[in-house]
Image (cartoon, coloured by chain):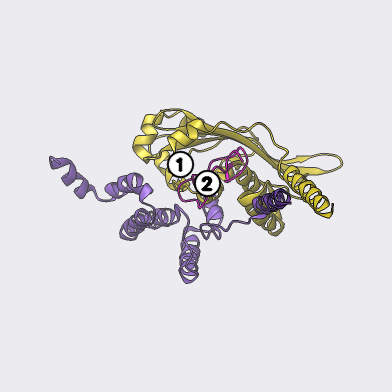
Chain colours: A yellow, B purple
Amino acid sequence: MNKTRTLQLLAVAAAALLAGCAHKPAPYDYAAFRQANPHTLLVMPPVNESPDIKASSSIWAQSTLPLSEAGYYVLPVTLVDETLRQNGIQTANDAQDIPREKLRDVFGADAAVYIKVTRYGTAYHVISSDTEVAAEARIVDLRSGALLWQGRAVASSAEQGNGGGGGLAAVLVAAVVKQIINTTTDAAYGYAGIADARLLSAPHYNGVLPGPRSPVYGKNVGAQ
Amino acid sequence: MRAVNVARRACAVALVGTLFGCAHKPTQLYMWESFPRQQYDVLLHEGASPDEQMHAMELHATKARAANAALPPGFRAHLGMLELNAGRADRAKELFEQEKAAFPESAPYMDRLLAKLNPTAQAKKTDSPA
């Protein structure tokens, strides 16, 4: 009798924990991602749809951290920027239109990351002013042209607390939050770091799969 | 009786597994310091001067060595680009080679950059039949 009761309590506790982990949308189909198995990523200059001209640089500069920590080799964005300029590419839109064969040839990357910044900056309202950054990303195989993954993320000063998802994303987000407190002059930059971490870190439910340099590479963590 | 024990053990294992899944705190692969910010400053051509940034990055590299921590992908290449822009091509070459050694995945791009710094070697390469 006593044993059964203990068992029931344990089952309830386990269920509660699982539920705590688990309010989730349908799992992402990683078949193409797994098959392509990219090792090196080329993050293209992000297209900016916000009014802030710093948005693209901010999201771009901070995209390499979560992707590198996810286990990929990420090509150095400042050198990629210079190479593109030397080849007459002036805008992110032009850069994102470059044929994949050409990108593969010049940079030797397995896949390209195409980012679009949809919101960036502070909106001033009567009651409160919120800083918000939103971005979308697609990862495309440069050898086959196949879409390997896509996702989107938002980070906003209006959020209560910081539920950045589990795992590394949460750790990175906590680190960036600490940074924002220290540098209030450029708040959007800090929220861009959070948005990048939420968008591109791994392992993360329905997020980018861990790459070859990750300790959890090849484990079934993406769709957990 | 036995079945209850087995079930209980399975339940405990599941519980521990769930806790681990939720609470596991991974450590970072690389020591980042201000590197994302430095990339941002260079992309925007603002912030610290290239000289100040190179100095900060050398300190970062020393700190990483002392802590036996890895420098992030692109760190050496970025520093190499700053050195190159400051007119120190030999130091830039060294750093591009270091990027390649630390991350062999960077070889195709680093080789392209190195070839541009070494026009004679590149000419020799294209001359030779191999």
Percent position of residue A163, x then y: 73, 47
Discs 2, 1 touching: Cβ within 8 Å:
yes
Identify the secondary structure beneath mark 2: helix
Type of residue at label 2? Leu
Is residue B86 depicted above or below A142 in this figure?
below
Q: Which residue is mark 1?
A: A41
Q: Can residue A91 be seen by looking at this rendering?
A: no
Badge 1 density bin: few <14, some 14–19, many ≥20, Cα 10 Å: many
Identify the secondary structure beneath mark 1: strand
Task: Point out the image quarter for the C terminus of chain A.
Answer: top right
* Left or right placement of residue B6 versus residue B66 in this view: right
Q: Which mark, residue A30?
A: none
Type of residue at label 1? Leu
Dot 2 falls on which chain? A
Percent position of residue B68, x then y: 47, 68
Q: Can residue B28 be seen by looking at this rendering?
A: yes
**Magenta-highlighted residues:** A200-224
Residue at horizontal 44 percent and vertical 38 percent from the top: A37
Residue nearest the viewer, comparing A81 with B28 = B28
* Left or right placement of residue B18 versus residue A96 in this view: right
Q: Which residue is mark 2?
A: A67
Is residue A25 depicted above or below B73 in this figure?
above
